[in-house]
Structure formats: structure tokens, C-alpha cells
Amino acid sequence: HVQFADDPTAVKARHITGLTTVMWGNDYPHAEGTFRSSAECIADNFAGVPDEDRAAILGGTLADVVGFDKTKKQAPTPA
């Protein structure tokens, strides 16, 4: 698995790497992370990405890796 914070190329390459290998993270609290502008970073990096792919990269894959029950809570998707 690979984690990224601000990498549009990683998002665009998801069809090559597969959704089960990439995970987004803001690297809180490190200054090189995106935690102060995560919403904007996600909007930019994931523009035009289907909701299913977006959900996998933003948390679904991590939930699978650590064994979380994904039916318990899901973050809202933009309208």
C-alpha cells in the first residue's frame, strides 16, 4: 500500500495501481501534510473522480486493511 497527501498523479494512476493499493492521508500534524487545507486538496486532487473510487482511496481501502466495518459510518459525499 502507498499513502499520499497531495498527488494528483496517484489519483489519475489508480487504474494502473488498483484502488486497493492507494490511500489518502493528510499526515497530521506534520507541516508538510495537508491538514490545514485538506478539503481543498481533496477537491483539487479528486475532481471528476467517481464517488466509488473516491470513497475507496479516501478511507475504504484503509478500512479493509485494518478490518473496520464499513457499514457503521460513511462520510458524506458531495452533492
Image (cartoon, helix red, strand yellow):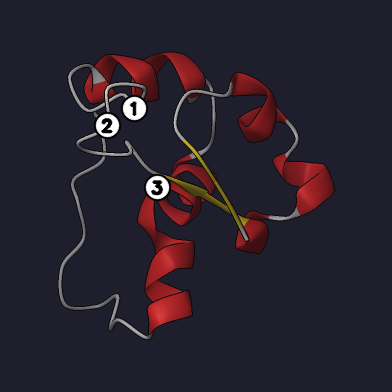
Q: Find numbered disc 3 in the image and state the secondary structure of the residue it sits on.
A: helix
Is residue 73 placed above or below 11 in the rendered structure? below
- Residue 41 pos. (x, y %): 36, 18
Residue matched to label 1: 33
Residue matched to label 3: 58
Which callout, 2 or 3, points at the residue further toward the start of the chain? 2
Closer mark to the observer between disc 2 and disc 1: 2
- Residue 33 pos. (x, y %): 34, 27
The answer to whether residue 76 is left or right of residue 7 is left
Residue 13 - label: none
Name the amino acid type tagged 2. His
Is residue 26 placed above or below 70 in the rendered structure? above
Residue 43 occupies quadrant: top left
The answer to whether residue 65 is left or right of residue 70 is right
What distance separates the C-alpha of mark 2 from that of mark 1?
5 Å
What distance separates the C-alpha of mark 1 from that of mark 3?
15 Å
Q: Find numbered disc 2 in the image and state the secondary structure of the residue it sits on.
A: loop
- CB within 8 Å, label 2 to label 1: yes
The answer to whether residue 57 is left or right of residue 17 is left
Name the amino acid type tagged 3. Leu
Label 3 CA crowd tier, 10 Å (few <14, some 14–19, many 20+): some
Label 2 CA crowd tier, 10 Å (few <14, some 14–19, many 20+): few
What residue occupies the far right of the structure in this picture?
Answer: 16
